[in-house]
Amino acid sequence: MGRLFGTDGVRGVANSELTPELAFSLGRAGAYALTKENNHRPQIIVGMDTRVSSGMLEAALAAGMCSMGAKVFHAGVIPTPGIAYLVRKYQLDAGVVISASHNPMQDNGIKFFNREGYKLPDQIEEEIERIIESNLENLPRPVGDQVGIRVNAEKSLEDYVSFLKSTFIDEENPALNLEGLKIAVDCANGATYKAAPLVLRQLGADVHPIFFEPDGVNINRGCGSTHIGPLASFVKERAMDIGIALDGDGDRVACVDENGMILDGDQIMSICGWSMKKRGKLKKDTIVATVMSNMGFFMLEKEKGIHIEKTAVGDRYVLERMLELGCNLGGEQSGHVIFLEHNTTGDGLLTALQLLKNMREKDVPLSKLNAVMEVLPQSLRNARVSPEKKESYLENEEIRLEIEALEAKYSGSGRLLIRPSGTEALIRVMIEGRNPQEIDADAKRMVQILEERLG
């Protein structure tokens, strides 16, 4: 068996790669690895997104956990960061989310959180894999009244929405609200379809939701934070003050200003980070980001006195570095933003609320706030390749020579970044430079070579 866990849990095509049998095994092994030191019945909360396969996998996972004697709290459809918060609020032993985030509908995933609301460290994931590889041998089999039970966590969405509202309320300005703001929100037909309109309306906004009618198969389909064009058009046509685009499980966000201009995670972090620094709230005057961030974002150090600490791509690496350094703001260009004083993982709705809070406090349009950083032209493209070849692309001489040529071309005036995706059979190509047409043409050619040689 190959490694089960990727950069964000276990993922695969539902009922083919990620089967109910595997979900059952993950339930048993996960419940044991995360709660074996307990002197009480394990208590685990499980949430899911709107995919047609999520109910099937949740049932299998919960059965596995119940077979270990666990009490499983069924939270239903709820954003991933909601589970990270609720596992702490309810003082449970672990949390699990059934979701493949922004991936296509046919995919699904299982990701675990520990009792502190953090994603699992490598050693715990490896222990779960070893247990499954050993065919779950020697795991306990409780009987009688020690068999686990599954109950509904009826207040889970309500409690998560209350938490989100609390991150917006300011002790120095308790009357702060969103009254008068026209907000468009793209729910990606995913896990935020209830929570997003609810929290924004409760704060007083005039909310116009789109893509908020999930049918099990339309999650992420032409919508959400990875397909932001429809939202940008909606904002301009309807004269909205801001557009908010969430992904399938609600852990990332992109925004659109009143002119239809898109703001990514770098721009959102620059606005919030600069505001936090001016108020003395940005710990270590540092934002933790990945190597994929725009070069304009790294220029904040010289222009605003904000140090940008770089990590490898992946929100788990961002979080690890934040904890090591004692920082409270970090994230990715893709819109995974972590406000560590509020939640332990990327939270798209929480991030949007912090941006909205800046708009209300300063009483300016989003386009004016967005002047904090200069965005350098960037072309980001995906090469679809064979899964078994994506990690060994440098072994191909033609690919290696093309990479070396582009690195030399953009040295000093831009940069080239190439990395295999941690969750899909893709190699991501990113080029930054001063000439948008030139960098796009070079990125297209690089993708073509990768697909021809590794497809």
Image (tube, rainbow, N blue to C red):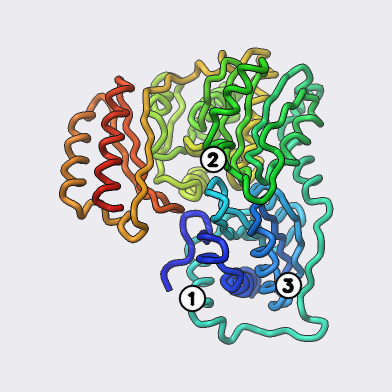
The amino acid type of the residue labelled 2 equals His
Tell me: 194 left or right of 302.
right
Read off the residue under disc 1.
130
Would residue 335 be found to the left or right of residue 163 on screen?
A: left
Which residue, given by chain and number where applicable, does mark 3 sit on? 70
* 1 or 2: tag closer to the N-terminus: 1
In this view, 111 is above or below 409: below
> Contact (CB < 8 A) between labels 1 and 3?
no
Is the residue 42 above or below the residue 267 in the image? below
Residue at 30% x, 41% y is 447
What residue lies at 32% left-to-right and 32% top-to-bottom? 431
How busy is the neighbourhood of tag 1: few (under 14 within 10 Å), some, or many (20 plus)?
some
Instruction: Classify mark 2: helix, strand or loop.
Output: loop
Residue on which the image places disc 2: 336
- Of the image marks 3 and 2, the number of the one nearer the N terminus: 3
Residue 304 appears anywhere in the view: yes
